Amino acid sequence: MDRPRFPAGPPRSRGAASRLRRGLPAVLGSGLGGEGGRVIETGPTPLVVDTDGGIDDVLALLLLAASGRPPDLVTVCFGNVDLRTAAHNVRAVLELVGAAPEVHLGAERPLVGETIHARHIHGDDGLGGSPIVAPTRPAASEDAVAALQGRLREAALSGTPVDLLTLGPLTNIALALRLAPGIAAGIGKLVVMGGTCYGRGNTTPAAEYNVYADPEAASIVLTAGLPTTMVPWEVCDDAAVPGSLVDAVLTAAPESGIAALVGGIARHARGVRRHLTGKDEFVLPDPLAAAVLLDPAIVERSVVASVEVGLAPGLTRGMTVVDPSGRLESPKIAVVEAVDHQAAHGLVARILGAREARREQTTEGRAADSGSTAIPA
């Protein structure tokens, strides 16, 4: 079926822009199509997830599994932690819920400059010391960039585009697009967790981590003319879940490996939040981006705008400049400005609803596995 795409240029009128702000769910699509008003049920669009394997990344993967839409392919990038630790975490959580997509390792460093990790937020293991069973399946041998090229090229040739959800630095995606520009036709919609809409950063005063970690890659992807929705940091920050609500949901959850993992992550993340802001809250950036992909109705307000990334050294490096006016001539994307807070606060319960695969649960030691470093418990 035909899939709606965001326009590459400015809306034709102010009215059109307003309709797009109000009608993001219609623009993103719902997985239903038809002719002459006849609705035809279609299966879920194939999903590719690119991730840097930190605390909120694994929660996003749990949310996708709980929603019946686990990824068909996962690519891993440096970011919150080093590449191999990130891949370990991703494989472990996928096995926890019985999902079996191939996991491909990609970029270990940004296109330009030094690698910047976020262990002070995610912990040395990327999970804040939370318990999880070590994965048994090795990562795929094919590089992430080659895997992305192959999957998106196949989608473009078959006329059945895939959805792409990015949860970390955009290095893998940028490399794939630069090496094979034609694969862009294989992307049905791209949801990016990253950037800022009001210049309120979480890594520098102006920049959000995923963009700041590789501004050049973000610039390539956000100006590529793809059907993109950006879920910026401020929206996630504003939709933080109160600690009292997190406690109530966790207390009501039955004991399980998933509950132990989510509880450990929540304790760690809330501790970091209290240290940085004095607030007892649980911020869920990657799960919120996944929720936007799963059900665009969670978006209450968005704007269609050009988004360009500050690349010069200094205070504004990694800043995303959001321009709905048309003065920037780069292709426009949808930028989320507000979400339904009640729905966002319900994400913890939805994540805990993921079904755990039946297997022996043990958290003794995170053994070194093929192609990865040993990770202590």
Image (spheres, grey):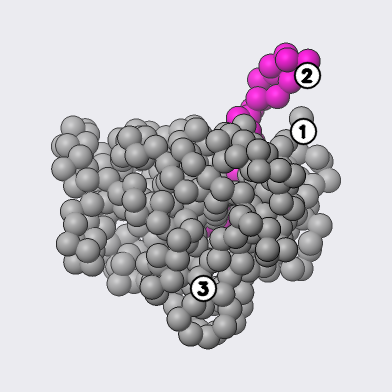
Amino acid type, residue under disc 1 in the picture: Asp
| 2 falls in the magenta region | no
Does residue 10 appear to the left or right of 336 in the view shown?
right
Q: Nearer the viewer, mark 1 or mark 3?
A: 3
Q: Farthest right residue?
A: 157
Q: Is residue 373 left or right of residue 127?
A: right
Q: Residue 62's x, y, as percent?
A: 41, 43
In x, y percent, where is residue 205?
38, 73
Name the residue: 71% across, 51% down: 10
Q: Amino acid at mark 3?
A: Gly
User: What residue did someone put label 2 on?
Assistant: 35
- Element at label 3: loop
* Residue carrying label 3: 318
The reply to whether dot 3 and dot 2 touch (C-beta < 8 Å) is no
Amino acid bearing label 2: Glu
Corner quadrant of residue 124: bottom left
Residue found at x 50% / y 70%: 319
339 and 112: which is toward the camera: 339
Instruction: Please identify the quadrant where the C terminus is shown.
Output: bottom left
Quadrant of the drawing holding the N terminus: top right
Please give the label number shown on residue 166. none
Mark carried by residue 2: 1
State which region is magenta: 29-51
